[in-house]
Image (cartoon, grey):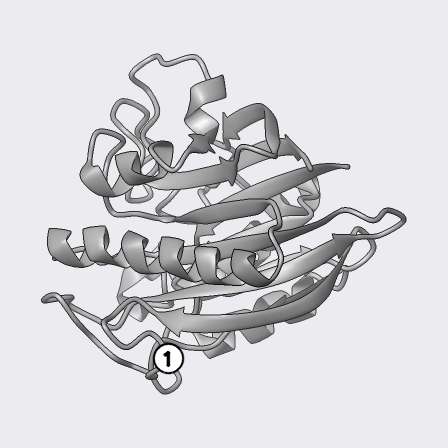
Amino acid sequence: MDLLIITFNLRYDNPEDGENSWSNRKAKVAEIIKQEQPAIIGTQELLPAMIKDLDELLTDYDWFGQPRQNDDEHCAIFYKKDMVQLVKNGTFWLSETPSVKASISWNSALPRICTWGEFVCLNSVHRFRVFNTHLDHISEEARIKGVQVIEKYMSALNESEHLPAILTGDFNAEPDSDEVKFWEDKPFTSVYSVMKTTGKELTFHDFEGSLEGAPIDFIFVSKDIEIKSGRIIHSKVDNRYPSDHYPVSAAVKI
């Protein structure tokens, strides 16, 4: 089964962003998604009101996820209802106590979470899991220990039933970091492994449209999934960027 996967940091709703505030961007985000038609979208930084907006604009999609604390940011996963069916899902915290809501460890600036879902492809028997996260922007230790928590959770789920896995997220770290290389040693495959390296893989551009630099947004897949192609999406809508990060896509075969 061929599917398109996207990871997309959507920049939280900050009125101080002026022309780039959420009210001016939400339709642009929806338009990019409609253009690309992904089966799965791993999002970061969505606040509850932002989720409500996208839920209304993207009628072909449903979503799930919990906030990291109270009514705070989510790592919500959106999925296209006519392509995949959600079987089960959950959210855990990247801390020493993953089941404790809002828990923080390792000098993390904020609670950090991973949302996961198990899917079945419609009109087929293929099932897979998606994990979506946003690692800490301050503490390297929290990022490194955080990915270890994610891998441990994946392994626990695989003990009951091994399924292909996809990991999406904003890692707040570049490809040569320990927290990114961790997945290549598991082994998982990065979307960037199928893309020609040019030195223009920047994904956080702060609404400026820069290209040169390294990515901090990633898609990894387990070895039983093939990445057929990958792309950093530089599209504008009405001559403005939908977020301060470029979305990254991977065409995969389950």
> In this view of the protein, can residue 239 be seen by the observer?
no
Q: Which residue is at the front of the view, 27 or 91?
A: 91
Instruction: From this view, report whether residue 178 is shown above or below residue 70.
Output: above
Spot the residue most to the right: 123
Count of marks overlaid on the render: 1
Mark 1 neighbour density, 10 Å: few (under 14) some (14–19) many (20 or more):
few
Q: Quadrant of the C terminus?
A: top right
Q: Position of residue 195 (x, y in %)?
A: 47, 18
> Mark 1 sits on what residue?
99
Q: Residue at x 83, y 55 (%)?
A: 82
Q: Quadrant of residue 102?
A: bottom left
Q: Nearer the viewer, residue 108 or 9?
A: 108
Element under disc 1: loop
Give the residue drawn at x 21%, y 71%: 110
Vertical comparison of 180 with 156: above or below = above
Q: Residue furthest front?
A: 159
- Image quadrant for the N terminus? top right
Disc 1 marks which amino acid?
Ser
Up-down relation of residue 85 to residue 188 (above or below): below
| Residue appearing at x 31%, y 30% in the figure | 202
Residue 115 in picture, x, y percent from top left: 47, 65
Position of residue 131 measured from the top left corner of the image (x, y, whole percent): 49, 55
Q: Quadrant of residue 52?
A: bottom right
Find the residue positioned furthest to the bottom.
70
Q: Quadrant of residue 107?
A: bottom left
Residue drawn where x is 54% and y is 36% of the image: 249
Q: Is residue 72 visible?
A: yes
Vertical placement of 90 versus 128: above or below? below
Q: Position of residue 231 (x, y in %)?
A: 52, 27
- Asked whether, in this view, residue 79 is left or right of residue 66, the answer is right
